[in-house]
Amino acid sequence: MSSGNHSFQQTVTRVDGGVVTTTTTRTQRIVQVSETSSGYPSDIFETGQVKRTVVTRTIKKNADGTEEVIEDIVSDDGGAQVQEKSKKGIFGFLSGKKDKSRTIIEESPKDRQAVFKPIGERKAPAKPLSDKEFRQDCLKWHNHYRAIHGVSPLKHSDELCRYAQEWADTLAKKDTFCHRPNNKYGENIYMAWSSDPTKEVTGQEAVDSWYSEIKQHQFGCEPRSLGSGHFTQVIWKASTELGSARARTATGKLIVVANYNPAGNLIGSFAQNVPPPKK
């Protein structure tokens, strides 16, 4: 297996009256390339994980000379999960059977686009969302995007919601951000943070972020990297059920977990499960 880390940073400052907003996007690409003993073409197992963090710092100058500083941070999980179809028809994670090294195919910095928007740039809900309203919002926007691609809508699953909530609570308690190990379902995760304790993350915000990876996806073939892995799981045709959950850490991080049944991102099945948008 071959690996390497590459970082890219971009800072933009915007001044609007007495408000100065600085947005810094840090992108780290972690490449791990390997072949497996599963019999699949080796090039599909090139896994370029892209970890993106967007930090927005807004300074508001008040009439009395004081300043109000609000920071918003949004980060992804560094890559979506990929499933491999085993000979027995049971899902196995890609990280399992590694043996031979391959050449790394790297992206240029201009191709690494941050797909997560600071929550400070989004209009807050008129009132706090209940957990039920959050789940409904998450389902609504999944199905909104699936309809664009002519894919059947997902159905709400109480079981998947409980499963997602369990992991979201675990991440919040440990104040960490990662995929559930040995996951029996498909999974997307999302995290945001703001120094404003009243900020909330909606289901739409998480789904919008995942779907925005469509810019990195090539339809009709197997992917050579996982730059669009969250998008493909949202659209995955064979997935029929969705469960979502959210949790807040003691340090103010807002975590969203979505689980899918059956799991998407199966090696060898991308072309038939991720159709392009309907014309």
Image (cartoon, rainbow, N blue to C red):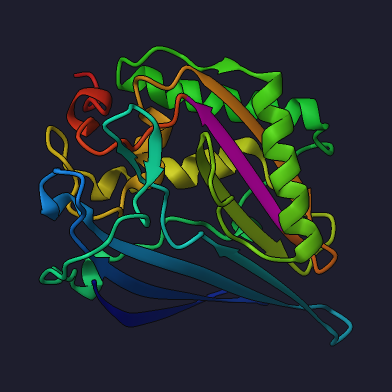
Q: Residue at x 50, y 17 (%)?
A: 154
Residue 199 image point, x, y percent: 77, 54
Residue 177: percent from left, percent from top: 62, 62
Q: Is residue 260 magenta?
A: yes
Q: Which residues are magenta?
A: 254-261
Q: Nearer the viewer, residue 6 or 193?
A: 6
- In which quadrant is the C terminus drawn? top left
> Which of the pair 205/88 is nearer the observer?
88
In this picture, residue 270 sits left or right of residue 39 = right
Query: In the image, is residue 91 above or below residue 12?
Result: above
* x 79%, y 37%: residue: 126
Q: Residue 147 appears in which quarter of the rendering?
A: top left
Q: Is residue 185 found left or right of 126 in the rendered image?
A: left
Q: Position of residue 43 (x, y in %)?
A: 12, 54
- Front residue of 31/94: it is 94
Picture quadrant of residue 257: top right
Q: How many marks?
A: 0
Seen as rendered, the residue at the extreme right is: 64
Q: Determine the residue positioned at 40% across, 62% down.
A: 114
Residue farthest bottom in this picture: 65
Residue 193 vertical position relative to residue 57 in the rendered view, above or below: above
Image-quadrant location for residue 121: bottom right
